[in-house]
Each structure stands twice: as C-alpha cells, then as structure tokens.
Image (spheres, rainbow, N blue to C red):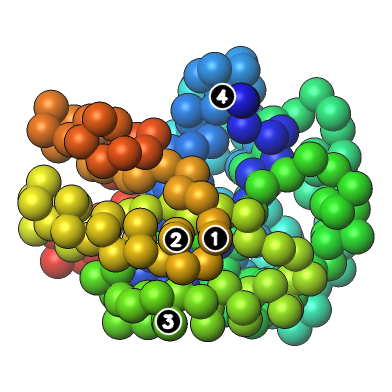
C-alpha cells in the first residue's frame, strides 16, 4: 500500500523529526514528482525545515512555513497557503510538527480539516534520548501530542542514533526498544531511519521494517 497523501511527522526534541521530514519529503517528491514540506515547528531554534527551501527546490520539494509574526502567537491562525496545500488533492504533503505543546496546538488548528482527509501521523522515536528511552515515556509523549493536537498517532518512526557515533550495532539495539513500544502500544513501525553511510550494513531484511536512508542536512555546532 502506498503512503497517504498527507504525512505528519512529530516527536520530542532530539528525535530527529526534522531530518526525517526533510528526507521523507524528498523521497516522496522523487516518487511522485513533487511534495510540499510544511514547517509547523514553531519553537525549536535549530534544525528548522523552513530554512531548506533553496536546497530542496531542485528535488521538487516546496517548503511552506507560517510568517515570522505568527510563530510567536500561542495559538497561531490558520495560514491559507498551508491550508491550501493540505486540501489540494494533487499535492503530496509532509508536515514537520514540534513535539512540544505549542507545536501540537499549531497542528490542532488544522485538525478539523485533516480528520476528513487521508493522512498518517507518525511519532519519531530516538530511544537514546532521555524522554523516549522506555515504553512508558514513549506512551506519555504520544498521549500529550494527541490530546493537544486533537489527532491520533497512527504509527512510529524508529530513529535510533547518536549522530556521528552511530554504529550498525547501536541501530539494531535501539530499534529493538522501538519494536517493544510498537507491540505495547499497538502502533506499526512505518520505517526505520538509517544514515546513508550505513546503507551497506543495514537493510530492510536486517531490521524487519522498511528503511528510509537519511542524507544528513543538519549538523550540531561541534561537528562543523
């Protein structure tokens, strides 16, 4: 089965959700000829998908974000350009949503429209981050996002990594934690994220789930 036209990717700070959203939008654009990447992460000051417009345009990805003045509003208004992309049946849409209350509220402004449209909402899990290292923390984070956004999480994205220190063994070990959460919560794993430098060592057959190979676009200051 192909992915729904609209994919929402959310997750706690440090989950890698923005890197995932950028790569996923690029993947879908390659398959379908175009994609719209909507940046609804209104708080995170680093690794913002709204800054990737020029980089992603040649790949067929259009980046849309709320105007700067609206990002400081606790409950931002519905933006016509964003709503238009969501409602246009010819547009493939990826939404990058902050896992904090403000990000979830921003998404909640579009919940009424999204409920009537085929979509998936994926929660990105990096089990090496403190708040999502165990099933209980993952469950709590999902409940918070669902309550505030008024939408349901439909699947997980497994993103086990320690950035440059990531090894194949670390990915396998972290992915087991996400698999445990998948079974406990009754949520499927949509795909596993693997940095492209590890592509020869980690395949779908090794991990038991589809793999999204990530090209890194964002680097912490100490790696630059």
Q: Work out how far the residue at label 2 is from the one at label 1, CA to CA, in angstroms.
A: 5 Å
Residue pointed to by mark 2: 183
Q: Work out how far the residue at label 2 is from the one at label 4, CA to CA, in angstroms.
A: 31 Å
Residue pointed to by mark 1: 186
Q: Is residue 150 above or below residue 79?
A: below
Residue under the image location 52 percent in, 82 percent down: 140
For the C terminus, the quadrant is: bottom left
Residue 43 horizontal/vertical position (percent): 56, 75
Residue 39 horizontal/vertical position (percent): 61, 55
Residue 27 horizontal/vertical position (percent): 48, 28
Residue pointed to by mark 4: 29
**SS at mark 2?**
helix
**SS at mark 1?**
loop
Specify few, some or many for label 1: CA neighbours under 10 Å numbering under 14, 14-19, or 20 or more. Answer: few
First of labels 3, 4 by sequence position = 4
Specify few, some or many for label 3: CA neighbours under 10 Å numbering under 14, 14-19, or 20 or more. Answer: some
First of labels 2, 3 by sequence position = 3
Residue 14 horizontal/vertical position (percent): 36, 69
Residue 91's tag is: none
């Amino acid at each position: 089965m192909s992915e729904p036209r609209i994919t929402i990717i959310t997750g706690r700070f440090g989950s890698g959700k923005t890197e995932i959203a950028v790569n996923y939008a690029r993947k879908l654009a390659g398959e379908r000829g175009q994609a719209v990447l909507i940046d609804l992460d209104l708080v995170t000051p680093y690794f913002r998908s709204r800054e990737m417009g020029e980089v992603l345009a040649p790949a067929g990805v259009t980046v849309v974000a709320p105007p700067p003045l609206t990002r400081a509003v606790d409950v931002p208004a519905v933006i016509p350009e964003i709503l238009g992309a969501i409602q246009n049946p010819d547009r493939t849409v990826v939404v990058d949503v902050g896992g904090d209350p403000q990000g979830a509220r921003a998404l909640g402004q579009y919940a009424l429209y999204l409920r009537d449209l085929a979509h998936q909402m994926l929660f990105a899990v990096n089990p090496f981050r403190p708040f999502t290292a165990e099933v209980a923390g993952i469950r709590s984070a999902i409940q918070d996002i669902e309550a505030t956004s008024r939408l349901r999480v439909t699947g997980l994205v497994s993103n086990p990594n320690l950035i440059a220190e990531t090894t194949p063994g670390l990915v396998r070990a972290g992915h087991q934690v996400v698999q445990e959460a998948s079974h406990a919560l009754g949520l499927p794993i949509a795909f596993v994220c693997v940095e492209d430098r590890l592509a020869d060592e980690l395949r779908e057959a090794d991990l038991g789930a589809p793999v999204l190979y990530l090209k890194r676009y964002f680097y912490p200051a100490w790696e630059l």
